[in-house]
Image (tube, rainbow, N blue to C red):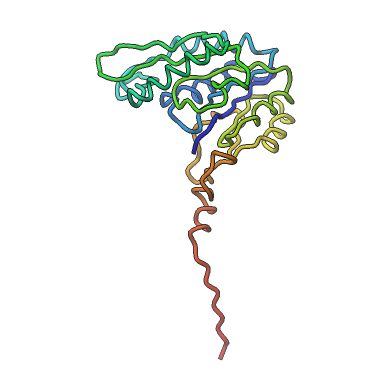
Amino acid sequence: MGGKNPFVILNDADLATAVNLAVQGSFYSTGQRCTGSSRLIVETGIHDAFVAALKEKMATLRIDNALKPGTDIGPVASEAQLAQDLSYIRLGTDEGGHLVCGGELISRDSKGYYLSPALISDTVNTMRINREEVFGPVASVIRVSNYDEALHTANDTEFGLSSGICTTSLKYATDFKRHASAGMVMVNVPTAGVDYHAPFGGRKNSSHGPREQGTYAREFYTTVKTAYTAAG
């Protein structure tokens, strides 16, 4: 599908919830999900606390064989994907971002391409790290001054698969659901992970046509026949 999915954290968000959702959305499945949260758009009042708490949480993640009990994050899928992840981490810092943590190669007993999840702060939405899909355990942080800027930044992308917001405000949650330019909108849940009975798909360059799953898919694949019978 393709995505550069935004996850917005507002000042009124519960910090622990925001951190947990960011970790799940950005780094679980080694970040190799088209619905992953690759852009963390954070309102300025909670920005520093969020980055610090996220860094602390990331330090506790266990990177190892995905089949090993207790593992949080498995290896990158291939050598080529690992090279791509590392190149985008370098690009993010070359563009002016700050590597808060991660981005290191890790050796484990089981053979694999192990990479510690990377968090890059001090980025702006025009950077390539925020425009192009990485498809790995790499997330960037964009600081915004208010909700309106957060919404604008979230929608300022050629993709539109999934988007999310963490807030305790029903007003902002409702507005975001209405105005986020994405096929799926999540409120206080990770951007990655869907109910299999619900329609799945995106907008802009994150779509390949009709929605998958649910009644939308059933109706798409149904040929309607109209029959008339006269009563005797």
Q: Nearer the viewer, residue 38 or 14?
A: 38
Q: Nearer the viewer, residue 5 or 83?
A: 83
Location of the C terminus by quadrant is bottom right
Which residue occupies 57% across, 87% down?
230
Image x and y of residue 132, in percent: 53, 27
Q: Residue furthest bottom?
A: 232
Residue 26 falls left or right of residue 163: left
> Could you say which quadrant of the image residue 50 lies in?
top right
Q: Is residue 92 above or below residue 149?
A: above
Residue 31 falls left or right of residue 63: right
Image x and y of residue 46, in percent: 66, 13
Which residue occupies 60% across, 15% down?
123
Q: Is residue 163 above or below residue 232?
A: above
Residue 73 falls left or right of residue 109: right
Which residue occupies 50% across, 23% down?
26
Image x and y of residue 187, in percent: 62, 31
Which residue occupies 36% across, 23% down?
76
Q: Is residue 22 above or below residue 210?
A: above
Residue 174 falls left or right of residue 6: right
Number of callouts:
0
> Could you say which quadrant of the image residue 114 lies in?
top left
Image x and y of residue 170, in percent: 71, 30
